[in-house]
Amino acid sequence: MYYTDRGIEELEKRRGEEEVSLAWVAEQLRTFTDLHPEFETAVDRLATWLARDDDDE
């Protein structure tokens, strides 16, 4: 188990039944990056990966 799994599990447990738009997720990522600029690269990589998830490799 990765350390990040705890956060992912908490997210799923607390908000797993909610439906949100990708626009909402994008805004949350922007807010997080504003508050924690040291994670800008990681957030950018996650957003890019999510955006391209269905691309052929």
Image (cartoon, helix red, strand yellow):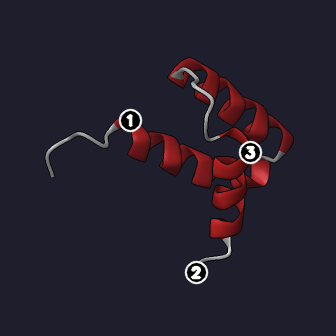
Outermost residue to the right: 35
* Residue wearing tag 2: 1
> Under tag 1, what secondary structure?
helix
Which amino acid lies under the numbered mark 2 shown in the image of this protein? Met
Q: CA distance from mark 3 to mark 1?
A: 24 Å
Quadrant occupied by the N terminus: bottom right
N-terminal of the pair, mark 3 or mark 1, is: 3
Task: Identify the mark at residue 51; answer none if there is no mark.
Answer: 1
- Check disc 2: other Cα within 10 Å, few if <14, some if 14-19, many if 20+: few
Check if mark 2's residue and mark 1's residue have beta carbons within 8 Å: no
Q: CA distance from mark 2 to mark 3?
A: 20 Å
Q: Nearer the viewer, residue 3 or 9?
A: 9
* Residue wearing tag 3: 14
Question: Would you say 54 lies left or right of 25 here?
Answer: left
| Quarter-of-image position of residue 51 | top left
Question: Would you say 9 lies left or right of 48 here?
Answer: right
Outermost residue to the left: 56
Q: Nearer the viewer, residue 41 or 1?
A: 1
Task: List x then y, in percent, for residue 22.
Answer: 52, 24
Q: Nearer the viewer, residue 32 or 19?
A: 19
Please state which of the two labelled residues, at mark 3 or mark 1, is closer to the viewer. Answer: 3
N-terminal of the pair, mark 2 or mark 3, is: 2
> Residue visible at 55% across and 44% down?
44
Q: Is residue 6 above or below residue 57?
A: below
Task: List x then y, in percent, for residue 42.
Answer: 60, 54
Which amino acid lies under the numbered mark 1 shown in the image of this protein? Ala
Q: Is residue 9 above or below residue 34?
A: below
Which amino acid lies under the numbered mark 3 shown in the image of this protein? Arg
> Residue visible at 65% across and 67% down?
4
> Residue visible at 67% across and 24% down?
27
Report the number of discs. 3
